[in-house]
């Protein structure tokens, strides 16, 4: 059964309660990462400009962040803007940045009341100063929170992150023999956090698009045709339930079935 905080948030009789009750608390993913995709297609289906899809996507972010915190996830990472997304029209990029600023301002109280720690991952120094200020303010205000860590990947690239970690290793004078996988992982933007157990992508695309390349080595992947602006608590619960049915082998062999009555 899912956490009390989650159940307390779902009205009696709501179909999501059925899903929440099926969640096994002892098989929770520690870290869920989401490639939020399909905003443009959502808008196109409604004959609206692409930016309206991004605007609608904010509601999905709000619902997903709160549902994840109430579900008791340790880390939630949302992919909001890739290093490749600068290729988009200037007006779309600037709308995305202002939506982000507006989101941070309007949602700060929700982050605080849910004990969520907010953190940006990506090449933050390449973002505009006003965006950086807003991000830094949200990070500072939530820094002492002890609940879920909410990473937003902004100007993020998986390869860029690996290059940045390699540069850090050189700058810190780490000797080649001292560099192993654990040490290298600690130099990534997500250093100290568990790797994603579950990677979700919306809008049906079967690709990774340069997201958390190192960290998803053994993530379970769940793709839904739902477009990001339509993604809600229900879909997150469906993904977690699907994840809990997976047999994770890490290169080994399937676990033998547990005999009835044996503890
Ligand atoms: C995801 O939706 C949002 C970002 C990448 C910022 P898209 O804008 O990629 O929407 P589609 O893929 O064109 O439908
Ligand atoms: C991935 O979506 C990036 C984000 C969700 C921020 P894209 O829409 O940019 O990815 P591609 O171009 O379809 O691979
Ligand atoms: Mg896309």
Image (cartoon, rainbow, N blue to C red):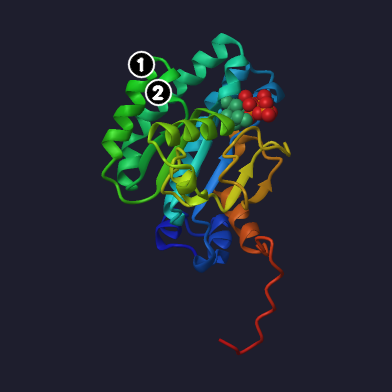
* Residue 63 pos. (x, y %): 48, 42
Mark seen at residue 13: none
* Residue 227 pos. (x, y %): 66, 35
Q: Residues within 10 Å of mark 1 (few under 14, many from 20)?
A: few
Left or right relative to 71: residue 109: left
Residue at the outermost top position: 90
Mark seen at residue 130: 1
Residue 203 falls in which quadrant of the image? Answer: top right
Residue that appears at 39% across and 49% down: 148
Determine whether 258 is above or below 142 in the image: below
Q: Of tags 1 and 2, which is closer to the observer? A: 1
Disc 1, disc 2: CB below 8 Å? yes
Q: Nearer the viewer, residue 230 or 193?
A: 193
Residue that appears at 43% across and 56% down: 72
Determine whether 231 is above or below 102 in the image: below
Q: Nearer the viewer, residue 49 or 150?
A: 150
Q: Which residue is mark 2?
A: 101
């Amino acid at each position: 059964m899912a956490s009390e905080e989650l159940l307390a948030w779902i009205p009696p009789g709501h179909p999501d309660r059925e899903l929440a009750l099926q969640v096994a608390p002892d098989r929770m993913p520690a870290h869920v990462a989401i490639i939020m995709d399909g905003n443009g297609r959502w808008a196109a289906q409604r004959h609206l400009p692409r930016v309206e899809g991004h605007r609608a996507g904010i509601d999905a972010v709000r619902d997903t962040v709160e549902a994840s915190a109430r579900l008791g996830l340790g880390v939630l990472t949302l992919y909001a803007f890739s290093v490749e997304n600068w290729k988009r029209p200037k007006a779309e990029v600037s709308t995305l940045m202002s939506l982000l600023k507006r989101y941070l301002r309007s949602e700060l109280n929700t982050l605080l009341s849910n004990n969520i720690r907010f953190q940006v991952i990506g090449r933050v120094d390449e973002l505009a100063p006003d965006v950086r200020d807003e991000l830094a303010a949200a990070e500072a205000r939530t820094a002492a929170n002890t609940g879920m860590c909410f990473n937003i990947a902004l100007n993020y690239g998986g390869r860029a992150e690996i290059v940045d970690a390699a540069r850090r290793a050189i700058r810190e004078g780490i000797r080649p023999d001292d560099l192993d996988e654990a040490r290298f992982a600690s130099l990534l933007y997500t250093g100290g956090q568990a790797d994603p157990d579950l990677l979700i992508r919306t809008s049906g695309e079967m690709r990774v698009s340069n997201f958390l390349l190192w960290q998803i080595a053994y993530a379970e992947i769940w793709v839904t045709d739902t477009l990001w602006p339509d993604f809600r608590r229900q879909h997150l619960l469906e993904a977690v339930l699907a994840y809990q049915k997976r047999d994770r082998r890490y290169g080994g062999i399937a676990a033998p079935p547990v005999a009835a009555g044996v503890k």
